[in-house]
């Protein structure tokens, strides 16, 4: 079977040391993009996505296990926040946002439980077409849940490149974590999953030919969205 790869994969294969990917680099608070890497932990890999779903880097990317160089942003439950990117997303795939309640966002290593609170799934059309609306975005914004408890959180965004995912172990994770202190929350305690752990290489949403036959359905990786109320 012949598959036409998007430009990005070709460039990565031929020039791995000069080819940077898109990164989630800044926190957006109520429409204002904040300074790069001020509230978002800076990873130490500009060039490579995470591909090993069992890796500790699935939490907050490589180099994102602490907030030594990162500040914690105070926001209100229900506020609209988001992430700005270094360049537009160019690999086809879904996008997920998770939160983890922690004692201290600056020192948290991502080992406590995560709940999913936002996602951008594909738009399917009965096998005629599949659109990945996260592609081309240069920023992603979403409301924080109103009902979660006040306190410190890690906010983890991931976009998953599925362009090579016809092969097992080939889904590519583009991940960043921001540090939040949420005020004015409620008492909801969402059920959580762990990173690594929640994803398997055989998940139908991670090991899939997205080109042909054109998918008629898609199973978003990870748990159901937390329902705010
Ligand atoms: C960074 O943070 C970790 C964990 O909080 C700590 O153990 C380490 O000493 C810190 N490193 C530096 C260079 O401050
Ligand atoms: C992204 O932009 C390209 C080039 O302008 C366009 O062909 C493509 O349809 C866009 N994709 C989405 C999902 O909007
Ligand atoms: C989902 O799509 C796959 C392949 O495209 C197909 O084999 C499967 O039956 C579909 N499942 C449902 C519930 O439609
Ligand atoms: Cu790539």
Image (tube, rainbow, N blue to C red):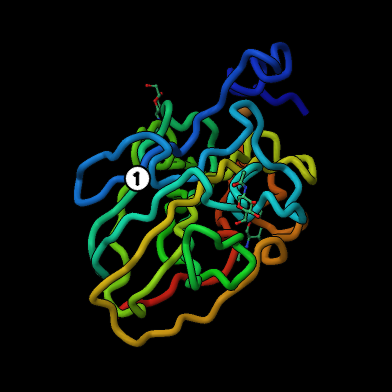
Question: Disc 1 designates what residue?
Answer: 27
Asked whether residue 94 appears in the rendered view, the answer is no
Which x, y percent locates residue 196?
Answer: 70, 61
Q: What residue is at 77 percent from the left and 56 percent from the top?
A: 54
Q: Secondary structure at mark 1?
A: strand
Q: Is mark 1 within 8 Å of ligand 1?
A: no
Residue 134 found in image quarter: top left
The residue lying furthest to the bottom in this view is 187
Q: What residue is at 57 percent from the left and 41 percent from the top?
A: 174
Pointer 1: residues within 10 angstroms few (<14), some, or many (20+)?
many
Quadrant of the rendering where the N terminus is positioned: top right
Seen from the viewer's position, the closer of residues 183 and 169 is: 183
Residue 183 found in image quarter: bottom left
Which x, y percent locates residue 32?
Answer: 21, 42
The quadrant of the rendered image in which ligand 2 is seen is top left
Q: Is residue 191 left or right of residue 57?
A: left
Which x, y percent locates residue 63?
Answer: 63, 42
Q: What residue is at 56 percent from the left and 76 percent from the top?
A: 192
Q: Is 186 placed above or below 47 here?
A: below
Q: What residue is at 45 percent from the left and 70 percent from the top?
A: 225
Q: Is 178 placed above or below 6 here?
A: below
Quadrant of the rendering where the C terminus is positioned: bottom left
Seen from the viewer's position, the closer of residues 212 and 203 is: 203
Image mark count: 1
Which x, y percent locates residue 39?
Answer: 39, 47
Residue 21 found in image quarter: top right
Asked whether residue 210 appears in the rendered view, the answer is yes
């Amino acid at each position: 079977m012949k598959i036409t790869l998007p430009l990005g994969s070709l460039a990565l294969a031929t020039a791995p040391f000069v080819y940077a990917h898109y990164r989630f680099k800044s926190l957006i608070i109520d429409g204002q993009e904040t300074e790069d890497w001020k509230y978002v932990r800076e990873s130490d890999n500009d060039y490579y996505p995470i591909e090993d779903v069992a890796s500790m880097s699935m939490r907050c990317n490589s180099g994102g296990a602490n907030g030594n160089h990162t500040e914690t942003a105070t926001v209100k439950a229900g506020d609209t926040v988001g992430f700005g990117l270094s360049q537009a997303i160019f690999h086809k795939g879904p996008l997920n946002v998770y939160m983890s309640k922690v004692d201290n966002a600056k020192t948290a290593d991502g080992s406590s439980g995560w709940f999913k609170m936002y996602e951008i799934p594909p738009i399917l059309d009965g096998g005629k077409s599949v659109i990945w609306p996260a592609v081309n975005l240069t920023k992603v914004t979403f409301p924080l849940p109103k009902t979660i408890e006040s306190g410190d959180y890690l906010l983890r965004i991931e976009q998953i490149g599925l362009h090579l995912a016809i092969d097992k172990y080939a889904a590519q994770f583009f991940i960043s974590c921001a540090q939040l202190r949420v005020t004015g929350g409620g008492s909801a305690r969402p059920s959580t999953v762990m990173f690594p752990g929640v994803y398997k290489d055989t998940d139908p949403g991670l090991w899939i030919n997205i080109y042909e036959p054109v998918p008629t359905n898609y199973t978003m990786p990870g748990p159901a969205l937390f329902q705010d109320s």
